[in-house]
Amino acid sequence: MAPSFRRSRLDLACEPSAVGRARSHVGDTLTRWRLPKDVVFDAATVVTELTSNAVRHAGSCADPFDAGQVRPSTVRRCALTLWLTNTRLYLGVWDQSLARPVLQPISLEAEGGRGLQVVAGLSEGQWGTALTRPEGKFVWAALPLPTGYRRPTARDSSPSRASSWR
């Protein structure tokens, strides 16, 4: 039997506000999907790191700002995708940059560069990147679901008779 799955996508402007919107979307979606709170927390952490990297390295305007323009330059885009299988939760962020992320060694002196270490740790090393066409990349991570976790079915999602009387 092929694994069943759920999927969600959120298109974003690749600017600082995207991080909070992506994190909020993860919390709302995964709560609706009835994932355990610790998985929701880990997923929000991973998405925060991946979206922050997209904003930092691929964000801002696609064209340099020109004060003589009537309209502002086109803002770069990014997108968050979540998909749930029977055993894993996958989280991915697409952006318009071709620069692949690099896992930096841990350094006590560095002011940054720890985000992918966090992603690698929470995903138990199950993360990666792929270039997309016509431009951009997709960075993903897979979080394991707890042993014995049972994905809710459509029947579980419907209101029970007892709750409908309240």
Image (cartoon, rainbow, N blue to C red):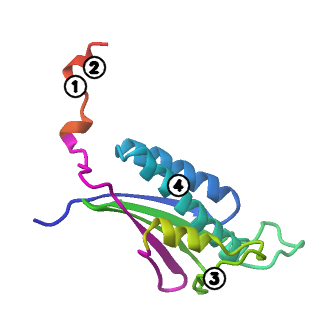
For label 3, the SS is: loop
For residue 160, which numbered disc appears in the image? 1
Label pair 1/2, CB-CB below 8 angstroms: yes
Mark 3–mark 2 distance (CA, rounded to whole Å): 52 Å
- The quarter of the rendered structure image containing the C terminus is top left
Image coords of residue 5 (percent x, y): 26, 59
Return the disc, 4 or 1, that comes first in the chain's sequence.
Answer: 4
**Residue 136 is inside the magenta segment:** yes
Please state which of the two labelled residues, at mark 3 or mark 1, is closer to the viewer.
Answer: 3
Residue at the extreme right: 67
Label pair 3/4, CB-CB below 8 angstroms: no
For label 4, the SS is: helix
Q: Residue at x 68, y 75 (%)?
A: 113
Q: What type is the residue that disc 1 sits on?
A: Ser
Please state which of the two labelled residues, at mark 3 or mark 2, is closer to the viewer.
Answer: 3
Residue at the extreme front: 108
Q: Nearer the viewer, residue 121 or 151?
A: 121
Q: What type is the residue that disc 4 sits on?
A: Ala
Mark 4–mark 1 distance (CA, rounded to whole Å): 30 Å
In the image, the segment drawn in magenta is 125-154
Graded by Cα atoms within 10 Å as few (under 14), some (14 to 19) or many (20 or more), the crowding at tag 3 reads: few
For label 2, the SS is: helix
Q: Nearer the viewer, residue 131 or 112?
A: 112
Q: Which residue is mark 2?
A: 163
Q: Which residue is mark 3?
A: 105
Label pair 3/2, CB-CB below 8 angstroms: no
Q: Which residue is mark 4?
A: 44
